[in-house]
Image (cartoon, helix red, strand yellow):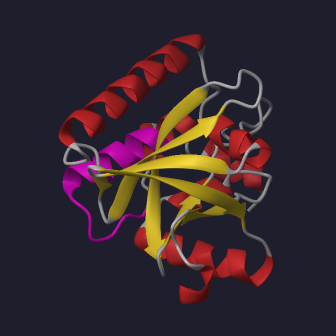
Amino acid sequence: MPTAQKQKTLSTWSTTKPEMEDTSAFVRAFTRLNVYLYSKPPSKTFKRINKSFLHLNIFLFRMSHGKILGRFGRLDGMLLTTTGRKTGKARTNPVGYVYDQGRFVVCAAPGHFDVPGGPQATHPAWYLNLRSNPRVTVDIGAEQFEATAEVLSGAERDRMWTHFTGVFPFIAEFQKRASHLIPVVVLTPSDLNPREL
């Protein structure tokens, strides 16, 4: 089935049923809503609402040291702070991660799917920022640390992608409906000894 046809099947609520195993009814419903919303061209209203939720997410995460919004189903959450490639200012975003031998793996999923006849999915701003400056700050729970970001490729990228989708199958929905390969990034804490990997 062509990609465009797959995307059109997501235009109605009744056909929006992403596969999410071992999760609560709330997580499944929230995921379903997001698949539905990401299938539409992002409107100005949606962008404003999304920005408000982003600020609320960051506030609640920091106030609760990650006890609120620090986990989504089986996926753990962090706050990732990058340096704006244009402004030079700190930019913070909540992202999901999986742990791998002392490092933290994140996926740069776009803000919406490719829209047939409309805007195509693009890389998130935080990913473009760390490509420009790989030095980042990570908040996990009450802990904050500096790290270096590395974009994976080849077999290592595929291995980590499989690991990530095993924890959070919903991410595969983005790959099915984006024309570009979703980047996989590993964050290595500054105090981690590479010899220990």
Task: Specify the quadrant that holds the N terminus.
Answer: bottom right
- Residue 44 visible (yes or no): yes
Location of residue 161 (image quadrant):
bottom right
Q: Residue at x 51, y 12 (%)?
A: 45
Location of residue 83 with respect to 197 vertically, above or below: above
On the image, the x and y values in percent for residue 176 come to: 66, 59
Location of residue 104 with respect to 15 vertically, above or below: below
| 195, 93: nearer the viewer | 195
Location of residue 75 with respect to 154 vertically, above or below: above
Q: Residue at x 40, y 39 (%)?
A: 33
Q: Residue at x 68, y 45 (%)?
A: 127
Residues in magenta, as a range: 19-35
Location of residue 20 (image quadrant):
bottom left
On the image, the x and y values in percent for residue 170 come to: 47, 59
Q: Is residue 30 magenta?
A: yes
> Main structural element of the magenta stretch: helix, strand or loop?
helix
Location of residue 14 with respect to 105 vertically, above or below: above
